[in-house]
């Protein structure tokens, strides 16, 4: 593969596939009929390794496919948008901190990952309230019902930040071994 553009497209496809697998392989069911997974770590990695734009596309597609294959059809459009925005925010923040060489990588991941995961928690909150309202719930009941899922989304987001902090040095090193230094 001589073309950098070809390698970038292949890397984006691989990260999208890994995001799907990480989301589907380990599922911890929650009382709110959702599940906690490790896919958010890959969502953040997409934004960091591919940059905010392409990373958002790869993360959105990978996460959306997990919902599609997992039978969560009503969540597919929301998941695509929410995970894309999460990767966009995480990637943008990470690369704007890149000039701070004294800041070690795990700290940078935490400082970009936590705000990005807040985007995820808020995004799912808004999407779920909208779904409840479309289903005919009263506004107050919808807001209260959806609040029950917020702590589980927070746990998922924090797990994602940890997974990203663990995997980023490994994948950054592997990319250098392949002859292409990806965006770390």
Image (tube, rainbow, N blue to C red):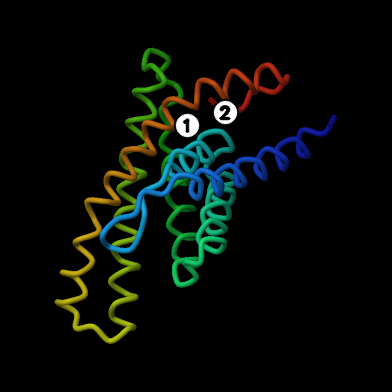
On residue 127, the disc is none
- Label 2 crowd bin: few (<14), some (14–19), many (20+), radius 10 Å: some
Q: Residue at x 53, y 48 (%)?
A: 59
Residue at the spot x=78%, y=39% of the render?
A: 6
For the N terminus, the quadrant is: top right
Q: Residue furthest bottom?
A: 136
Which badge, 2 or 1, is on the more N-terminal residue? 1
According to the picture, the residue beneath numbered tag 2 turns out to be: 183
Look at the picture and state if 48 lies above or below 57: above
Front-lying residue, 36 or 43 = 36
- Give above or below for 100 relative to 95: above
- Tag 2 and tag 1, C-beta contact below 8 Å: yes
Give the residue drawn at x 32%, y 83%: 135
Nearer the observer: mark 2 or 1; the answer is 2
Apparent side of residue 165 relative to residue 73 in the rendered image (left or right):
left
Q: Secondary structure at mark 1?
A: helix
163 horizontally vs 114: left or right: right
Q: CA distance from mark 2 to mark 1?
A: 8 Å
Residue 120: give x, y in percent of width and height. Answer: 36, 52
What residue lies at 34% left-to-right and 51% top-to-bottom? 119
Q: Which residue is mark 1?
A: 95
Q: Position of residue 66 (x, y in %)?
A: 53, 56
Q: Regarding mark 2 in the picture, which secondary structure is present there?
A: loop
Q: Nearer the viewer, residue 21 or 105?
A: 21
Badge 1: few (under 14), some or many (20 or more) residues near its Cα, within 10 Å? some
Q: Residue furthest top?
A: 102
133 horizontally vs 108: left or right: left
Q: Nearer the viewer, residue 176 or 162?
A: 162
In the image, taking residue 73 as reference, residue 11 lies left or right, namely: right
């Amino acid at each position: 593969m001589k073309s950098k553009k070809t390698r970038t497209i292949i890397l984006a496809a691989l990260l999208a596939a890994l995001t799907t697998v990480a989301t589907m392989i380990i599922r911890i069911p929650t009382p709110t009929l959702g599940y906690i997974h490790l896919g958010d770590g890959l969502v953040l990695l997409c934004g960091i390794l591919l940059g905010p734009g392409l990373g958002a596309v790869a993360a959105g597609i990978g996460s959306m496919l997990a919902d599609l294959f997992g039978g969560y059809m009503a969540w597919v459009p929301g998941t695509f948008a929410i995970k894309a925005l999460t990767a966009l925010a995480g990637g943008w923040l990470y690369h704007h901190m890149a000039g701070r060489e004294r800041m070690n990588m795990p700290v940078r991941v935490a400082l970009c990952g936590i705000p990005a995961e807040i985007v995820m928690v808020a995004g799912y909150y808004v999407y779920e309230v909208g779904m409840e309202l479309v289903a005919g719930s009263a506004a107050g009941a919808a807001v209260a019902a959806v609040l029950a899922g917020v702590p589980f989304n927070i746990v998922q987001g924090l797990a994602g930040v940890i997974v990203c902090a663990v995997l980023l040095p490994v994948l950054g090193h592997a990319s250098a071994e392949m002859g292409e230094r990806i965006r770390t």
